[in-house]
Image: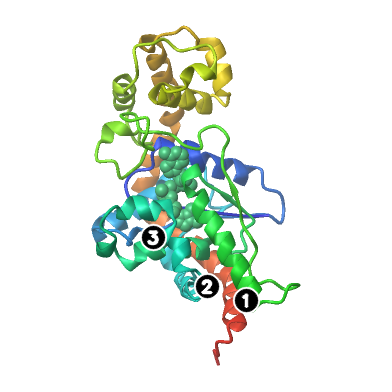
Protein backbone atom coordinates (compact mmCIF):
# COMPACT_ATOMS: atom_id res chain seq x y z
CA UNK A 1 0.00 0.00 0.00
CA UNK A 2 1.35 3.39 -0.96
CA UNK A 3 -0.77 6.46 -0.28
CA UNK A 4 -0.12 9.61 -2.31
CA UNK A 5 -2.04 12.89 -2.41
CA UNK A 6 -1.52 16.60 -2.94
CA UNK A 7 -3.00 20.02 -2.34
CA UNK A 8 -2.42 23.31 -4.11
CA UNK A 9 -0.69 25.83 -1.85
CA UNK A 10 -2.74 28.78 -3.07
CA UNK A 11 -4.93 30.45 -0.46
CA UNK A 12 -5.86 29.04 2.91
CA UNK A 13 -6.60 25.51 3.92
CA UNK A 14 -10.38 25.46 4.29
CA UNK A 15 -12.97 23.19 5.80
CA UNK A 16 -13.70 21.54 2.42
CA UNK A 17 -10.07 20.50 2.04
CA UNK A 18 -9.97 19.33 5.64
CA UNK A 19 -13.14 17.24 5.74
CA UNK A 20 -12.92 16.16 2.09
CA UNK A 21 -9.27 15.13 2.05
CA UNK A 22 -6.77 16.08 4.75
CA UNK A 23 -8.59 14.35 7.61
CA UNK A 24 -8.47 11.16 5.53
CA UNK A 25 -4.77 11.66 4.90
CA UNK A 26 -4.17 11.80 8.64
CA UNK A 27 -6.38 8.77 9.34
CA UNK A 28 -4.70 6.69 6.65
CA UNK A 29 -1.27 7.77 7.92
CA UNK A 30 -2.21 6.79 11.47
CA UNK A 31 -3.49 3.38 10.38
CA UNK A 32 -0.47 2.52 8.27
CA UNK A 33 1.34 -0.72 8.99
CA UNK A 34 5.02 -1.60 8.57
CA UNK A 35 6.13 -1.56 4.97
CA UNK A 36 3.37 0.86 3.93
CA UNK A 37 4.16 4.43 2.98
CA UNK A 38 2.39 7.78 2.64
CA UNK A 39 3.56 10.75 0.57
CA UNK A 40 1.78 14.11 0.81
CA UNK A 41 2.85 17.09 -1.22
CA UNK A 42 2.15 20.73 -1.97
CA UNK A 43 1.23 21.02 -5.64
CA UNK A 44 3.20 24.21 -6.25
CA UNK A 45 3.88 23.27 -9.88
CA UNK A 46 0.13 23.05 -10.45
CA UNK A 47 -0.30 26.49 -8.92
CA UNK A 48 1.52 28.20 -11.81
CA UNK A 49 -1.14 27.02 -14.27
CA UNK A 50 -3.12 30.15 -13.43
CA UNK A 51 -2.03 33.77 -12.96
CA UNK A 52 -0.22 34.05 -9.63
CA UNK A 53 2.00 36.31 -7.57
CA UNK A 54 5.40 34.66 -6.92
CA UNK A 55 5.72 36.07 -3.38
CA UNK A 56 2.27 34.74 -2.47
CA UNK A 57 3.05 31.29 -3.87
CA UNK A 58 6.27 31.17 -1.86
CA UNK A 59 4.54 32.20 1.35
CA UNK A 60 1.50 30.00 0.63
CA UNK A 61 3.70 26.91 0.19
CA UNK A 62 5.28 27.30 3.63
CA UNK A 63 1.93 28.10 5.22
CA UNK A 64 0.28 25.06 3.67
CA UNK A 65 3.12 22.86 4.92
CA UNK A 66 2.53 24.26 8.43
CA UNK A 67 -1.23 23.74 8.07
CA UNK A 68 -0.81 20.08 7.11
CA UNK A 69 1.47 19.40 10.06
CA UNK A 70 -1.00 21.24 12.31
CA UNK A 71 -3.78 18.94 11.04
CA UNK A 72 -1.78 15.87 12.05
CA UNK A 73 0.50 15.00 9.13
CA UNK A 74 3.59 13.77 10.93
CA UNK A 75 6.77 14.31 8.87
CA UNK A 76 8.38 11.41 10.72
CA UNK A 77 5.75 8.97 9.53
CA UNK A 78 4.72 10.54 6.22
CA UNK A 79 6.86 12.04 3.49
CA UNK A 80 5.87 15.71 3.21
CA UNK A 81 7.34 17.83 0.42
CA UNK A 82 6.64 20.29 -2.39
CA UNK A 83 6.75 19.26 -6.05
CA UNK A 84 9.26 21.93 -7.03
CA UNK A 85 11.97 20.15 -5.01
CA UNK A 86 11.35 16.87 -6.83
CA UNK A 87 12.05 17.53 -10.55
CA UNK A 88 10.98 13.97 -11.41
CA UNK A 89 7.32 15.15 -11.35
CA UNK A 90 7.86 17.55 -14.26
CA UNK A 91 10.05 15.05 -16.10
CA UNK A 92 7.49 12.28 -15.90
CA UNK A 93 4.77 14.67 -16.97
CA UNK A 94 6.62 15.30 -20.21
CA UNK A 95 6.97 11.59 -20.83
CA UNK A 96 3.24 11.10 -20.19
CA UNK A 97 2.32 13.95 -22.53
CA UNK A 98 3.11 11.50 -25.34
CA UNK A 99 0.40 9.15 -24.04
CA UNK A 100 -2.36 11.53 -22.84
CA UNK A 101 -4.87 12.46 -25.54
CA UNK A 102 -6.25 15.93 -26.29
CA UNK A 103 -9.77 14.50 -26.28
CA UNK A 104 -9.31 13.12 -22.75
CA UNK A 105 -8.13 16.48 -21.43
CA UNK A 106 -10.88 18.35 -23.26
CA UNK A 107 -13.44 16.36 -21.28
CA UNK A 108 -12.11 17.36 -17.85
CA UNK A 109 -14.77 19.34 -15.98
CA UNK A 110 -12.16 21.34 -14.06
CA UNK A 111 -10.64 22.51 -17.36
CA UNK A 112 -14.09 23.44 -18.67
CA UNK A 113 -15.00 25.29 -15.44
CA UNK A 114 -11.72 27.16 -15.12
CA UNK A 115 -11.32 28.03 -18.79
CA UNK A 116 -14.98 28.99 -19.26
CA UNK A 117 -15.55 30.66 -22.62
CA UNK A 118 -11.96 31.83 -22.88
CA UNK A 119 -10.12 28.60 -23.78
CA UNK A 120 -7.76 30.34 -26.20
CA UNK A 121 -6.50 32.63 -23.48
CA UNK A 122 -5.59 29.87 -21.00
CA UNK A 123 -2.08 28.64 -20.30
CA UNK A 124 -0.96 25.32 -21.77
CA UNK A 125 -0.27 24.32 -18.16
CA UNK A 126 -3.95 24.64 -17.22
CA UNK A 127 -4.88 22.27 -20.05
CA UNK A 128 -2.09 19.80 -19.27
CA UNK A 129 -2.70 20.07 -15.51
CA UNK A 130 -4.24 16.57 -15.19
CA UNK A 131 -1.18 15.02 -16.87
CA UNK A 132 1.03 16.49 -14.15
CA UNK A 133 -1.45 15.16 -11.60
CA UNK A 134 -1.16 11.71 -13.19
CA UNK A 135 2.64 11.98 -12.98
CA UNK A 136 2.33 12.90 -9.28
CA UNK A 137 0.78 9.57 -8.37
CA UNK A 138 2.23 7.25 -11.03
CA UNK A 139 5.77 8.36 -10.14
CA UNK A 140 5.43 6.66 -6.75
CA UNK A 141 3.39 3.61 -7.82
CA UNK A 142 0.55 4.95 -5.62
CA UNK A 143 -2.11 2.38 -4.77
CA UNK A 144 -4.48 4.69 -2.81
CA UNK A 145 -5.17 8.39 -3.39
CA UNK A 146 -7.38 10.09 -0.76
CA UNK A 147 -9.22 13.02 -2.38
CA UNK A 148 -12.53 14.88 -2.42
CA UNK A 149 -15.15 14.12 -5.05
CA UNK A 150 -13.97 16.91 -7.38
CA UNK A 151 -10.63 15.17 -8.02
CA UNK A 152 -12.08 11.78 -8.94
CA UNK A 153 -12.20 12.54 -12.64
CA UNK A 154 -8.52 13.50 -12.66
CA UNK A 155 -7.65 10.19 -11.05
CA UNK A 156 -9.67 8.24 -13.57
CA UNK A 157 -7.61 10.02 -16.20
CA UNK A 158 -4.42 9.01 -14.37
CA UNK A 159 -5.59 5.40 -14.57
CA UNK A 160 -6.31 5.75 -18.31
CA UNK A 161 -2.87 7.21 -18.92
CA UNK A 162 -1.20 4.46 -16.89
CA UNK A 163 -3.14 1.77 -18.69
CA UNK A 164 -2.39 3.10 -22.16
CA UNK A 165 1.30 3.59 -21.35
CA UNK A 166 1.55 0.04 -19.98
CA UNK A 167 -0.27 -1.36 -23.03
CA UNK A 168 1.79 0.60 -25.54
CA UNK A 169 5.24 0.38 -23.98
CA UNK A 170 5.46 -2.38 -21.37
CA UNK A 171 5.03 -6.13 -21.35
CA UNK A 172 1.99 -7.51 -19.55
CA UNK A 173 3.95 -9.13 -16.72
CA UNK A 174 6.14 -6.07 -16.02
CA UNK A 175 3.92 -2.96 -16.22
CA UNK A 176 5.71 0.35 -15.64
CA UNK A 177 2.84 1.92 -13.65
CA UNK A 178 0.41 0.83 -10.95
CA UNK A 179 -3.23 1.88 -11.43
CA UNK A 180 -4.13 4.16 -8.48
CA UNK A 181 -7.42 3.88 -6.57
CA UNK A 182 -9.15 7.12 -5.46
CA UNK A 183 -10.39 7.06 -1.83
CA UNK A 184 -13.30 9.50 -1.37
CA UNK A 185 -14.90 9.93 2.09
CA UNK A 186 -18.56 8.84 2.08
CA UNK A 187 -19.70 11.85 4.13
CA UNK A 188 -18.05 15.19 3.32
CA UNK A 189 -16.89 14.27 -0.18
CA UNK A 190 -18.18 17.66 -1.29
CA UNK A 191 -18.48 20.54 1.18
CA UNK A 192 -20.35 23.44 -0.38
CA UNK A 193 -19.98 27.23 -0.12
CA UNK A 194 -21.71 28.83 2.89
CA UNK A 195 -23.21 31.42 0.52
CA UNK A 196 -24.37 29.14 -2.29
CA UNK A 197 -25.31 25.50 -1.87
CA UNK A 198 -24.71 24.83 -5.57
CA UNK A 199 -21.01 25.81 -5.56
CA UNK A 200 -18.25 23.88 -3.78
CA UNK A 201 -16.37 25.53 -0.92
CA UNK A 202 -13.25 26.79 -2.63
CA UNK A 203 -10.19 28.93 -2.05
CA UNK A 204 -10.83 30.73 -5.31
CA UNK A 205 -14.25 32.06 -4.21
CA UNK A 206 -13.83 35.86 -3.92
CA UNK A 207 -16.02 35.97 -0.80
CA UNK A 208 -14.24 34.89 2.38
CA UNK A 209 -17.69 34.47 3.96
CA UNK A 210 -18.21 31.46 1.67
CA UNK A 211 -15.67 29.32 3.50
CA UNK A 212 -14.30 28.46 6.93
CA UNK A 213 -10.50 28.71 6.91
CA UNK A 214 -8.62 26.53 9.33
CA UNK A 215 -6.85 29.61 10.66
CA UNK A 216 -10.06 31.64 11.30
CA UNK A 217 -10.46 32.75 14.91
CA UNK A 218 -13.52 31.65 16.93
CA UNK A 219 -15.38 34.94 16.37
CA UNK A 220 -14.95 34.68 12.60
CA UNK A 221 -16.10 31.07 12.60
CA UNK A 222 -19.24 31.90 14.61
CA UNK A 223 -19.98 34.90 12.41
CA UNK A 224 -19.61 32.92 9.18
CA UNK A 225 -21.85 30.11 10.41
CA UNK A 226 -24.51 32.50 11.70
CA UNK A 227 -24.51 34.35 8.38
CA UNK A 228 -24.48 31.15 6.30
CA UNK A 229 -27.32 31.06 3.82
CA UNK A 230 -30.19 28.79 4.90
CA UNK A 231 -33.97 28.67 4.60
CA UNK A 232 -36.70 29.45 7.16
CA UNK A 233 -37.81 25.79 7.61
CA UNK A 234 -36.73 23.73 10.63
CA UNK A 235 -34.58 20.65 10.03
CA UNK A 236 -36.47 17.55 8.87
CA UNK A 237 -36.16 14.24 10.73
CA UNK A 238 -35.05 12.32 7.64
CA UNK A 239 -32.52 12.99 4.87
CA UNK A 240 -35.24 12.89 2.18
CA UNK A 241 -36.57 16.15 3.68
CA UNK A 242 -33.35 17.95 2.66
CA UNK A 243 -33.98 17.41 -1.04
CA UNK A 244 -33.88 20.81 -2.79
CA UNK A 245 -32.48 22.41 0.37
CA UNK A 246 -28.80 22.44 -0.62
CA UNK A 247 -27.67 24.98 1.99
CA UNK A 248 -29.42 23.16 4.83
CA UNK A 249 -27.99 19.83 3.65
CA UNK A 250 -24.51 21.35 3.59
CA UNK A 251 -24.66 22.50 7.22
CA UNK A 252 -25.98 19.12 8.36
CA UNK A 253 -23.26 17.38 6.31
CA UNK A 254 -20.58 19.47 8.03
CA UNK A 255 -22.08 18.66 11.42
CA UNK A 256 -22.22 14.95 10.57
CA UNK A 257 -18.63 14.89 9.30
CA UNK A 258 -17.31 16.71 12.37
CA UNK A 259 -19.01 14.26 14.72
CA UNK A 260 -18.29 11.19 12.56
CA UNK A 261 -21.96 10.41 12.18
CA UNK A 262 -24.28 9.99 9.22
CA UNK A 263 -26.65 12.76 8.05
CA UNK A 264 -29.57 10.46 9.00
CA UNK A 265 -28.25 10.11 12.50
CA UNK A 266 -27.82 13.88 12.98
CA UNK A 267 -31.38 14.47 11.72
CA UNK A 268 -32.78 11.87 14.11
CA UNK A 269 -31.39 14.02 16.92
CA UNK A 270 -31.96 17.51 15.49
CA UNK A 271 -35.11 17.04 13.38
CA UNK A 272 -37.56 19.84 14.19
CA UNK A 273 -34.77 22.23 15.32
CA UNK A 274 -34.65 25.62 13.59
CA UNK A 275 -31.41 27.18 12.32
CA UNK A 276 -31.54 29.71 15.16
CA UNK A 277 -30.51 26.85 17.46
CA UNK A 278 -28.66 24.55 15.03
CA UNK A 279 -26.21 27.17 13.79
CA UNK A 280 -24.74 28.04 17.23
CA UNK A 281 -24.36 24.30 17.97
CA UNK A 282 -22.51 23.80 14.68
CA UNK A 283 -20.40 26.92 15.29
CA UNK A 284 -19.32 25.64 18.72
CA UNK A 285 -18.41 22.29 17.28
CA UNK A 286 -16.28 23.92 14.59
CA UNK A 287 -14.54 26.22 17.05
CA UNK A 288 -13.63 23.24 19.24
CA UNK A 289 -12.34 21.24 16.26
CA UNK A 290 -10.29 24.10 14.87
CA UNK A 291 -8.87 25.46 18.12
CA UNK A 292 -5.95 23.00 18.50
CA UNK A 293 -5.24 23.09 14.76
CA UNK A 294 -4.96 26.87 14.53
CA UNK A 295 -2.87 26.99 17.71
CA UNK A 296 -0.32 24.54 16.30
CA UNK A 297 -0.42 26.30 12.94
CA UNK A 298 0.57 29.63 14.52
CA UNK A 299 3.40 28.00 16.48
CA UNK A 300 4.76 26.14 13.47
CA UNK A 301 4.81 29.27 11.32
CA UNK A 302 7.15 30.92 13.78
CA UNK A 303 9.90 28.38 13.08
CA UNK A 304 10.63 28.94 9.43
CA UNK A 305 13.87 26.92 9.50
CA UNK A 306 12.10 23.87 10.84
CA UNK A 307 9.54 24.08 8.03
CA UNK A 308 12.26 24.40 5.38
CA UNK A 309 13.99 21.36 6.87
CA UNK A 310 10.79 19.27 6.85
CA UNK A 311 10.25 20.00 3.16
CA UNK A 312 13.90 19.43 2.21
CA UNK A 313 14.01 16.07 4.02
CA UNK A 314 10.68 15.00 2.55
CA UNK A 315 11.85 15.92 -0.95
CA UNK A 316 15.06 13.90 -0.57
CA UNK A 317 13.06 10.80 0.37
CA UNK A 318 10.54 11.40 -2.42
CA UNK A 319 13.30 11.70 -5.04
CA UNK A 320 14.76 8.40 -3.94
CA UNK A 321 11.42 6.61 -4.41
CA UNK A 322 10.74 8.38 -7.71
CA UNK A 323 13.96 7.55 -9.56
CA UNK A 324 13.41 3.84 -10.38
CA UNK A 325 9.95 4.47 -11.88
CA UNK A 326 11.16 7.44 -13.90
CA UNK A 327 14.10 5.37 -15.19
CA UNK A 328 11.72 2.58 -16.16
CA UNK A 329 9.53 5.06 -18.06
CA UNK A 330 12.53 6.46 -20.01
CA UNK A 331 13.66 2.94 -20.84
CA UNK A 332 10.21 1.79 -21.92
CA UNK A 333 10.01 4.72 -24.36
CA UNK A 334 13.38 3.87 -25.93
CA UNK A 335 15.03 7.09 -24.82
CA UNK A 336 18.85 6.90 -24.71
CA UNK A 337 20.35 8.31 -21.49
CA UNK A 338 24.06 7.43 -21.58
P1 LIG B 1 -7.12 21.19 -4.16
O1 LIG B 1 -5.89 21.91 -3.72
O2 LIG B 1 -8.17 21.97 -4.86
O3 LIG B 1 -7.81 20.46 -2.94
C1 LIG B 1 -7.10 19.58 -2.06
C2 LIG B 1 -8.02 18.44 -1.63
O4 LIG B 1 -9.20 18.95 -1.02
C3 LIG B 1 -10.36 18.42 -1.67
N1 LIG B 1 -11.41 19.47 -1.68
C4 LIG B 1 -12.66 19.28 -1.25
N2 LIG B 1 -13.28 18.22 -0.69
C5 LIG B 1 -14.59 18.38 -0.33
N3 LIG B 1 -15.28 19.53 -0.47
C6 LIG B 1 -14.69 20.63 -1.01
N4 LIG B 1 -15.37 21.77 -1.13
C7 LIG B 1 -13.32 20.53 -1.42
N5 LIG B 1 -12.44 21.41 -1.98
C8 LIG B 1 -11.28 20.74 -2.13
C9 LIG B 1 -9.90 18.07 -3.07
O5 LIG B 1 -10.71 17.08 -3.65
C10 LIG B 1 -8.49 17.59 -2.83
O6 LIG B 1 -8.47 16.22 -2.47
N6 LIG B 1 -5.45 18.97 -8.31
C11 LIG B 1 -5.50 18.86 -6.86
C12 LIG B 1 -4.16 18.74 -6.20
C13 LIG B 1 -3.35 17.61 -6.70
C14 LIG B 1 -3.51 16.23 -6.41
C15 LIG B 1 -2.48 15.57 -7.11
C16 LIG B 1 -4.43 15.52 -5.64
C17 LIG B 1 -2.27 17.74 -7.52
N7 LIG B 1 -1.74 16.50 -7.75
C18 LIG B 1 -2.35 14.17 -7.06
C19 LIG B 1 -4.30 14.11 -5.60
C20 LIG B 1 -3.26 13.47 -6.29
C21 LIG B 1 -6.19 20.12 -6.33
O7 LIG B 1 -6.14 21.16 -6.91
O8 LIG B 1 -6.72 19.94 -5.07
Disc 3 on helix, strand or loop? helix
Q: Residue furthest bottom?
A: 338
**Residue 282 to residue 44: above or below:** above
Q: Quadrant of the C terminus?
A: bottom right
Q: What is the distance, in whole Å, between disc 2 and disc 1 at their CAs?
A: 9 Å
First in sequence, mark 2 or 3: give its number: 3
Give neighbour class at mark 3: few <14, some 14-19, many 20+ (Cα, 10 Å): many
Residue projecting furthest to the right: 173
N-term mark: 2 or 1: 2
Q: Quadrant of residue 324?
A: bottom right
Numbered badge on residue 46: 3
Residue in the picture at 47% in, 20% down: 242
Horizontal and vertical percent for residue 140?
59, 64
User: Is there CB contact under 8 Å for labels 2 and 1?
Assistant: yes
- In three-dimensional space, the C-alpha distance between marks 2 and 3, rounded to whole angstroms, equals 19 Å
Cβ(mark 1) to ligand 1 < 8 Å?
A: no
Question: Label 3, label 1: how many angstroms apart (C-alpha)?
Answer: 27 Å
- Marks 3 and 1: which is nearer the front? 1
Disc 2: CA contacts within 10 A as few (<14), some (14-19) or many (>=20)? some
Which residue does the image show at 50% across and 69% down from the upper left?
100
What residue is pinned by disc 1?
168
Q: Could you say which quadrant of the image residue 111 lies in?
A: bottom left
Label at residue 146 = none
Q: Earlier in the sequence, mark 3 or mark 1?
A: 3
Q: Quadrant of the N terminus?
A: bottom right
42 vs 270, nearest the viewer: 270
Q: Can you identify the residue that label 2 sits on?
A: 99
Position in image of residue 261 (x %, y %): 58, 24
Amino acid sequence: MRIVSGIQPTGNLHLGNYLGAIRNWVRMQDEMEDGQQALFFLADLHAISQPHTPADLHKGTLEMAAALVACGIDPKRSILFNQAQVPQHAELQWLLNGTARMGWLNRMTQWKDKAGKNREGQSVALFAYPVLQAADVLLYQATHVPVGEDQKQHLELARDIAQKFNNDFASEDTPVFTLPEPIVPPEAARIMSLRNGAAKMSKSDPSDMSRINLADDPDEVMKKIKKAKTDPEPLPSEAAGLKDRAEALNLVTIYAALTDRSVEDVLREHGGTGFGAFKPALGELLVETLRPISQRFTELLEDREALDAILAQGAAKAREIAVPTLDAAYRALGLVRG
